Amino acid sequence: MNRGISGQLDDTGFGIVDAMLPNIGKDSWFRVKAMIDTGASRCLIQESLTITTEKVFFQESVAINPVGGIVPTKEYLIDLMLDEKNERGGIVIPNVRFCAINEPSLQVGLLIGAEFLKNFDFVYNGTKNSFSLYL
């Protein structure tokens, strides 16, 4: 447990963080909003983001759409950077498995689920309307 990121919960009780994804063929990253969802089993990425994101195809699969239903999906391994504003530089978590979905009603680019969270310490404080994720 080296470093942590923290923030306030949104109106629906989810933690929202800034994340960074790698650009294809460039030595640069781009910012995207991510929702921490302890009720989601897997990590999801909006399909439109996979066009510009450096990724490795993993497999064809199915995913549970967060607004309902089961959808066919492609799974990708994508490096994820968190805490990029830290003076020591961002923390890169390599090869995070994301399922690509097309869900316009999801107001973020990424959904971070339990498959990712189980590898780190996540503290949810409902009484203080805050969260912390220790990487």
Image (cartoon, grey):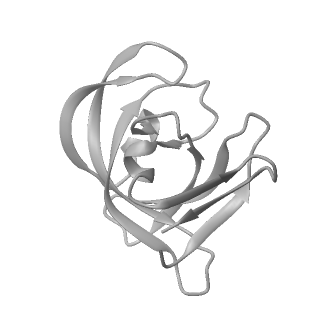
Q: Position of residue 38 (x, y in %)?
A: 53, 40
Q: Position of residue 53 (x, y in %)?
A: 38, 52
Q: Position of residue 14 (x, y in %)?
A: 67, 41
> What residue lies at 40% left-to-right and 51% top-to-bottom?
116
Residue 25 found in image quarter: bottom left
> What residue lies at 43% left-to-right and 43% top-to-bottom?
114
Judge whether 22 appears above or below 83 on screen. Answer: above
> What residue lies at 66% left-to-right and 49% top-to-bottom?
16
Who is closer to the viewer here, 128 or 8? 128
Q: Is residue 80 left or right of residue 73?
A: right
Total numbered circles? 0
Q: Is residue 93 left or right of residue 3?
A: left
Residue occupying the far bottom of the picture:
88
Residue 60 found in image quarter: top left
Judge whether 18 appears above or below 57 on screen. Answer: below
> What residue lies at 50% left-to-right and 61% top-to-bottom?
121
Q: Is residue 84 left or right of residue 21?
A: right
Q: Is residue 60 left or right of residue 104?
A: left
Q: Position of residue 91 (x, y in %)?
A: 46, 73
